Structure formats: structure tokens, C-alpha cells
Image (cartoon, rainbow, N blue to C red):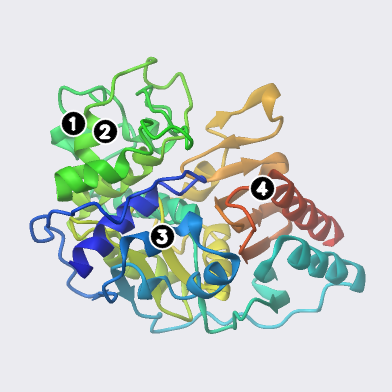
Amino acid sequence: MGRITGLVSGLALAAVLAGCTVRVGSETEFAAPPPPAMAAKTVAITQPPARDQSDLQVLFWSDSQRSDRFRAMEQWFAGHEVPAAKTVRALPKGAPLNAELQAEIAALMKDTNAAGIMVLVDGKVRYESYALGLGPKDRWTSFSVAKSFTSTLLGAAIKDGFITSLDDPVTRYIPELTGSAYEGVSVRQLATMTSGVAWNEDYTDPNSDVAQMARFVIEYGPDAVVAQMKALPREAPAGEKWVYKTGETNLIGVLVENAVGMPLAEYAQAKIVEPAGFAGGLFWMVDPRGGNIGGCCLSLRLSDYARMGQFALEGGNGTVPEGWFAEAGKPQVDFGADAPGFGYGYQWWTYPGGNYGAQGIFGQAITLVPDKRMVMAVVSNWPTATSSEARSQARAVAANIAESLE
């Protein structure tokens, strides 16, 4: 029961990506799904000890529980363990940022309960600090920052020829969606969340689509993601409306895994961890298929969050198509007057000035400033899952750092 509970809870946790609340009562009886169809060959699977289901509801953890457990999610949820890169990318020390900027970053850490911040400029560490018991060799969970990893693996699958084009129909790679509202939707539209398929991401509504994710896991096991998504109706022509959909990012994960024939974590070992030179191992939660949750739930060191940003900044070291990150980090969707300068790319958020980044609840972020060759990685334990004030403060600090650079 411990393994099944961990798997079910892992996919339920994916519904937390943007701050949603999903309750899966401890009284629920979980039917064991069939054996995982997506067995990893080169990465190990971590099986946590059996836990009471009520103790796996991340949004209801206390502040001290989050600070402790965000460093050790593998002790609470099942997942794949990817080893560190054989050749670690060195991050040499650069000149420290000036005292005023260091004070701003220290204030950001205190104000937003950050566990760690690292700033790279030209691949050199200009600032590094830790708190909340986190150390340089400890990992911290990502939440939706994982989406940008999944996007990168989508690019790698195109580069490797597993996926012919972003303009391919989604049904080519997930044929079970034939006849659903995803008929005629392209991979590109899935990546930009412009499928036009209806989705309710109301976190306060127990009947919303995002709140129903856990129910589909219980009822459908390995088929949960596709079963839920193929039942959705269409609300707009494909390509015409942007709606943030937790379920669609998980669908991208299924699509990539179907195309490459291995779990995301295993593909990430070859296409991200090794070429980016990660110094520590990567943990990525699994679902009942034995594959990974595309939209959530990987854990890595603060320095490896920064290495991921540097990897993207430098174009991906040949593992993705030429210009992939320039396109992925460009506003494929412009939010317009409601949020001037902001938009959405291929599972990356886009910011004013040509900057872009990855974001996750409770204050996880990788921010890239290409013009200044700068990366800022932040891992946090915000008091609340979402905070526009904390996010704005972090962006302001990043902007001040960038402005100080030549």
C-alpha cells in the first residue's frame, strides 16, 4: 500500500503546481494500478516508507514541515533518482556583487523566507547564500520549475528525431486522444497552453478539473492523465486562447515519454544532467505509469538550478535544436494590457526586456537575463503557496542586479 499511496499522491501533487488545493482523504481506499509500463533502465526508483495519506498533503504542511521536507521529498513520494553528471560543470567564483546589492538580496531572503539564492554572471558565481537548514549539497523541490525541464526534453526529442515537428498533431504521439477535443491540436499549441480545450483550474472548487486529477488517478491508475484529458470539451479554436492548464503539462510529459520510450528522468540524464554538468543527483516523482510527472516535482541542488539556467542561456550544448531556448523563452503568447511585457513561451514564463524564467509555488524560480549573461536561482519556503508580492520583489532584485552589470 505504501508504494501505491506514494504513486497516487505524486500525481495528485502535480495539481499543486500553480497553488491548487487538492484533498485526498486518508479514508480513501486506493486500488492498486497495474505494474508500471514505463520502467527506467538507467535510473533507480526510490520507494518511500508507507505514510498516512493525510500526511502527504503538501499545502497543509506547517512552515517547519515544509522547510524540512522540501529538502527531502524522496522520503515522502516515489520517484526516480538520477545520478550527478560524470563531468561536473565548474562554477568559479566571480567578483562579489556590491554591498548594496548584497543587502538587497539578504533582505529578499529574509522577507520571502528563501532557502537559497545564487547569481551567475558569465557562468561565475557572484552571489551565493543559504538558509532554513539548506546547504550547498542539499536538494530542494521545484514544483512548476519542472515544466521548463519538460519543455527542454520536448526540444531534445525533436532534435533526436523522436518528434518530427512542433506542428505535428498531438494524436500522433498519444493516439488515445483521437476523437477527443485534442484532435487537430498541435504539439506547439500544447506547449504554449493554447489548445482551446476547456479546463477549470479553480483551486477552491472541488469539482474543478484540477481538483479532479487525484480522482482520475484512483479510478484509472496508469491511464489517469489521458483518461481525464480526452474527456474535456473544446471551448475555443486551437491556437486562439491561452489558459493555464496543469493537466496539459502532464500530457506533454506523456507525449515525450511515448515518443522517446523512456521516463523523463532517464531522458533528462542524457539531455540535461550530463550536458549541463549537474553536481548533484536529481529526484523526479513518478506516477502510476512508472513515468514522471511532467509538470512538477523534481528536486536538485541550488547550484544545479543555476546550472540549468546557464545551460539554457548558452543554448543547450547541442541537445536541443539551434535557437530552441530563444524560441522557448520568447512570448509565444503575449498577455497584453493585463500584464504589459509578460507572456508565455514553451513552458517558460516571459518577462519584460527579453528575459524569461521558470516559476514554481512557494517561491522556486530560475530567472534568465540573456543580455547581461545572468542567471538567478532562488529556492524558498514562502508562507503561502503563491505570492505576487514576493514574486515581484524577487523580479525587482534581479532587475537591479542586471542593471548594475556592464
Name the residue beneath numbered marker 2.
Answer: 229
Name the residue beneath numbered marker 4.
Answer: 387
Residue at the far front: name it: 27
Say whether disc 3 or disc 4 marks the residue closer to the N-terminus: 3
Say whether disc 1 or disc 4 marks the residue closer to the N-terminus: 1
Q: Amino acid at mark 4?
A: Ser
Q: Is residue 97 above or below residue 136?
A: above
Say whether disc 2 or disc 4 marks the residue closer to the N-terminus: 2
Left or right: residue 2 versus residue 303 is left
Say whether disc 2 or disc 3 marks the residue closer to the N-terminus: 2
Q: Distance between the Cα atoms at labels 2 and 4? A: 29 Å
Name the residue beneath numbered marker 1.
Answer: 177
For label 2, the SS is helix
Mark 3 vs mark 1: give the one in front: 3
Whether label 1 touches label 2, CB < 8 Å: yes
For label 3, the SS is loop
Q: Is residue 321 visible?
A: no
Pointer 2: residues within 10 angstroms few (<14), some, or many (20+)? many
Q: Residue at x 44, y 33 (%)?
A: 201
Q: Residue at x 40, y 73 (%)?
A: 282
Q: Nearer the viewer, residue 101 or 160?
A: 101
Left or right: residue 75 versus residue 44 is right
Q: Distance between the Cα atoms at labels 1 and 2? A: 8 Å
Q: Distance between the Cα atoms at labels 2 and 3? A: 20 Å
Mark 2 vs mark 4: give the one in front: 4
Name the residue beneath numbered marker 3.
Answer: 297
For label 1, the SS is helix
Please provide percent x and percent y for residue 11: 31, 53
Say whether disc 3 or disc 1 marks the residue closer to the N-terminus: 1
Please provide percent x and percent y for residue 15: 40, 46
